[in-house]
Amino acid sequence: MAQTDTHRGSQVGNYMGQPIFQTIESASGTYVFDRIAKSVDGEFPLEQLNKGELLIKPGLIYRPKG
């Protein structure tokens, strides 16, 4: 998602020094924070994502709203 096209909802926490936003909105839709990804050797395997979910640095998983 391009930074300029993104709108963020209220901050609900922090993870690794980065804010966790309740929602993220972009041209492709609205996404809701769901969970923190599991790190394996410092990487975040994409197979832990369900269809339509987004993985955002530093390991935050957002699911489509709805």
Image (cartoon, helix red, strand yellow):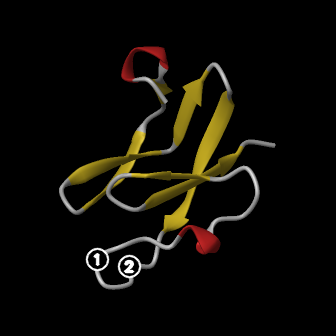
Q: Residue at x 53, y 34 (%)?
A: 24
Q: Is residue 42 depicted above or below 27 in this figure?
A: below
Q: Amino acid at mark 1?
A: Gly
Q: Residues within 10 Å of mark 2 (few under 14, many from 20)?
A: few
Q: Residue furthest left?
A: 17
The image's mark for residue 56 is none
Q: Residue furthest top?
A: 4
Q: Nearer the viewer, residue 6 or 10?
A: 6
Circle 1 packing at 10 Å, graded few (<14), some (14-19), many (20+), is: few
Query: How far is mark 1 from mark 2, CA to CA?
Result: 5 Å
Residue 26 horizontal side relative to residue 66, left or right: left
Numbered circle sitting on residue 42: 1
Residue at position x 53%, y 66% from top? Answer: 35
Say whether residue 64 is left or right of residue 41: right
Q: Decide: marks 1, 2 in contact (CB < 8 A)?
A: yes
Q: Residue furthest right?
A: 66
- Residue type at mark 2 is Ser
Q: Residue at x 63, y 40 (%)?
A: 31
- Tell me which residue sits at (61%, 46%) in the image: 32
In the rendered structure, find residue 39 and report the number of the disc placed on it. Answer: 2
Classify 59 as above or below 32: below
